[in-house]
Amino acid sequence: MASHHVITVQPQFSTAPPVGQWQTGLMDCCSDCGICLCGTFCFYCLSCQVAGDMDECCLCGSSVAMRTLYRTKYNIPGSIMDDYMAAACLPHCSLCQLKRDINRRKELGIFW
């Protein structure tokens, strides 16, 4: 007698990237002194670089929205409140972390 196999579960393919993390910490300024100096002395230039890397308006580089967009794009855990607190309380550190992360992802070939 032939046996019948009943498939009850279909294989699933996820299009969401795996949970990510920041490539450097918020206060890791010494990991790239060039970015730190640029963020300190030419904040708006660095902001425009970040916005350009992400194909966004130059005025948006240091915004909470930009940080949230980036975090969401790379599936980095956090919340809008975390992004707001980082951008409001430590704007230079927040922007520098974003630029360091972009650069590291470019080096690893995982920046899209």
Image (cartoon, helix red, strand yellow):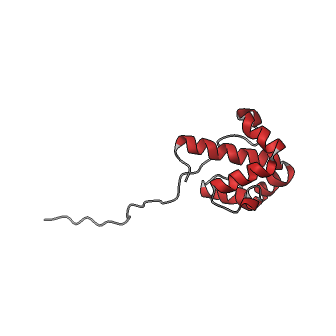
At a point 38% along the width and 61% down the height, the residue shown is 11
At a point 74% along the width and 44% down the height, the residue shown is 96
Snapshot quadrant of residue 4: bottom left
Nearer to the camera, 27 or 45:
45
Residue 27 visible in the picture: no
Snapshot quadrant of residue 73: bottom right
For the C terminus, the image quarter is bottom right
Nearer to the camera, 107 or 15:
107
Nearer to the camera, 53 or 96:
53
State the image coordinates of residue 37 (x, y, percent, origin top left).
79, 38
At a point 71% along the width and 56% down the height, the residue shown is 67
Q: Is residue 3 left or right of residue 44?
A: left
Snapshot quadrant of residue 105: top right
Does residue 18 sit above or below 36 in this rendering? below
State the image coordinates of residue 87 (x, y, percent, origin top left).
81, 53
At a point 53% along the width and 47% down the height, the residue shown is 110
The residue furthest right is 89
Residue 9 visible in the picture: yes
For the N terminus, the image quarter is bottom left
State the image coordinates of residue 2 (x, y, percent, origin top left).
15, 65
Q: Is residue 106 left or right of residue 30?
A: left
Nearer to the camera, 45 or 13:
45
State the image coordinates of residue 91 (x, y, percent, origin top left).
82, 50
Does residue 9 sit above or below 45 in this rendering? below
Count of number-bearing discs = 0
The residue furthest left is 1
